[in-house]
Image: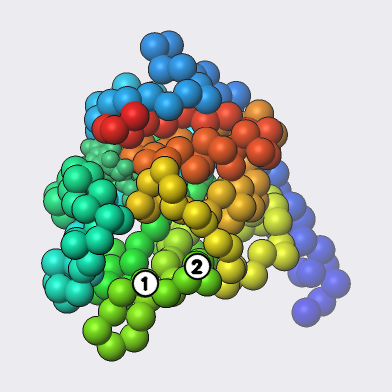
Amino acid sequence: MPREAKQLVESIDTTMKTLAATLFQIPPTVLPAGFKPNTRLQMDGLDFLAGQPETTYPAAFFDPQYRGVLEKLSYGNEGKDRGKRRCALKQMSEQVIGRFIREIDRVLTPSGHLFLWVDKFHLCRGVHPWLDGTGLDIVDLVTWDKATFGMGYRTRRRAEYCIILQKQPRRAKGVWKVHNIPDVIQERVFRKDHPHAKPVGLQGTLLAAVTDPGDTVIDPAAGSFSVLTAAQAHGRNFMGCDLEG
Ligand SMILES: C[S@@+](CC[C@H](N)C(=O)[O-])C[C@H]1O[C@@H](n2cnc3c(N)ncnc32)[C@H](O)[C@@H]1O
């Protein structure tokens, strides 16, 4: 390419980058009154989300309470203590999960991230129906190796999956700030307080990759509030709730 043409391309590139930085500049977060940050709110997650202003949060976690594998493949362990506690939790229908995700999409900032926990069944079946009507794209996947054996007629479950979604405009440069995260992470969780508690260390690593200190992350179905613990460990704020508190 001639030198003049190369210079022109470079100058257009710089102009576009400056324009993008201006357009997508994220204003400082103004948290809504009536929702106290860094506490364990007890309320319905859809009511919580309805009270949040749009384009406010750079990151959200969502770990739906579904019965996918247990119901569809009938290899549950309801007779055991953890199974009983799991059954006592309110289940979410596919429609409710879709409503949560549309609301999360509404409150995320442009290029904000949703970390969506799924099991093997939902990973294989696909989560696209849940994304209808949103500007969310799947951009990555992290496998959580629990280092313990779960149930299974054929193979026994040892992993869960965190699908990483990004709201439009989709971009990594300048938004995803940590570049040494492997896509399989082993972390033991001792589930004394909640049957579905997710790993604090992994969630902390993920939220630190897409937020700055002082930012606020949300989780509208927080269970053991593992994301609250992870956020505090990294100097971030947390807003979230669970029906059970
Ligand atoms: C899979 S667990 C979340 C576990 C959590 N990620 C953790 O690390 O502990 C799902 C949670 O959703 C809660 N839940 C179910 N329906 C809800 C609703 N409508 N609003 C808020 N929480 C709800 C359940 O009480 C349960 O604690």
The colouring scheme, among rainbow, by chain, secondary structure or one colour, is rainbow
Tag 2 secondary structure:
loop
Taking 167 as reference, is 215 above or below it? above
Q: Position of residue 57 (x, y in %)?
A: 49, 34
The residue where tag 2 is placed is: 146
- Image point (25%, 61%), residue name: 80
Numbered badge on residue 133: none
94 to the left or right of 57 = left
Q: Nearer the viewer, residue 116 or 171?
A: 116
Q: Residues within 10 Å of mark 1 (few under 14, many from 20)?
A: few
Residue extending furthest toward the front: 80
Q: Quadrant of the N terminus?
A: bottom right
Q: Residues at badges 2 and 1 in contact (C-beta under 8 Å)? A: yes
Task: Determine which quarter of the picture holds residue 179.
Answer: bottom right
Q: Position of residue 137 (x, y in %)?
A: 40, 59
Taking 142 as reference, is 194 above or below it? above
Residue 209 visible? The answer is yes
